[in-house]
Amino acid sequence: MAAEVLGLKRSGAADTDVGADEFAALYLAQFGPLSGYAQALTGDPAAAVDIAQEAFTRLFARWRAVRDARAWVFFVATNLARDYWRGVARDRDLTDRMTPRSVASAGAHDPWLRDLVERLPERQRQAILLHYYADVSVEEIARLLRVPVGTVKRRLHDGRQRLASDVRGEI
């Protein structure tokens, strides 16, 4: 009966009937708990349903060879959840790599501070943006601007002093 509900029985196909009722009963009894387990592992209800479906699909393909079907399907769901998290991490890494890290996008988080930095004299602004927004070392800034390291340090110091006074309202 349960196999007919899931569409597992075909008329005239005697060997597909072997175990179909047992599989259907297991599916009906365990799909809810399995998808709940997968949701606990992933935190994503849609991914949990996909994982549960995939686990039962793999079980159905190996139905005759599996001894403890309930344990096996939960084991497969655990591995599929691991694969899910690997995919999430891979997607996050790819997104991070593709996200442009430019000076212009860095200022979007603190527009008032970026406005203050834009008001600095060109040399101080250049040093501040490269060092604090683009995370470039003092030595690298000196090399890029073709000035001594001490000059970059002085520009950073003067720029910080001016920004501090602007923040305090001593404009």
Image (spheres, rainbow, N blue to C red):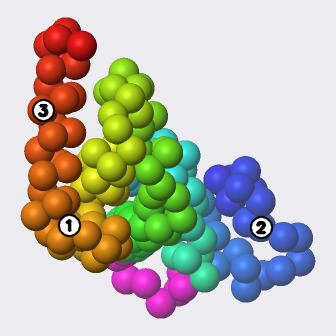
> Mark 1: which amino acid?
Ser
Q: Quadrant of residue 96?
A: bottom left
Residue hosting label 1: 137
The residues colored magenta run 62-72
- Mark 1 and mark 3 lie on one chain; the one further toward the N terminus is 1
Where residue 104 is drawn, which disc sits there? Answer: none
Q: Classify residue 101 as left or right of residue 112.
A: right
Q: In the figure, residue 111 lies in which quadrant?
A: top left
Report the predominant secondary structure element of the magenta stretch.
loop
Three-letter code for the amino acid on which mark 2 is drawn: Lys
Taking the image as shown, residue 44 lies to the left or right of residue 71, namely right
Q: Crowding at label 2, few (<14), some or many (≥20) Cα neighbours within 10 Å?
A: some
Q: Is residue 70 magenta?
A: yes
As measured in the structure, the alpha-carbon distance from the residue carrying label 1 to the one carrying label 3 is 19 Å
In x, y percent, where is residue 1? 68, 53
Q: Is residue 74 left or right of residue 16?
A: left
Say the numbered circle drawn on residue 161: 3
Query: Is residue 117 visible to the viewer in this orientation of the structure?
Result: no
Task: For marks 2 and 1, give the one nearer the viewer.
Answer: 1
Q: Residue furthest top?
A: 169
The amino acid on which the numbered mark 3 sits, given as a three-letter code, is Gln
Mark 2 sits on what residue?
9
Query: Where does the image place residue 101, in percent across and percent down from the top left?
Result: 45, 57
Closer to the camera in the image, 135 or 96: 135
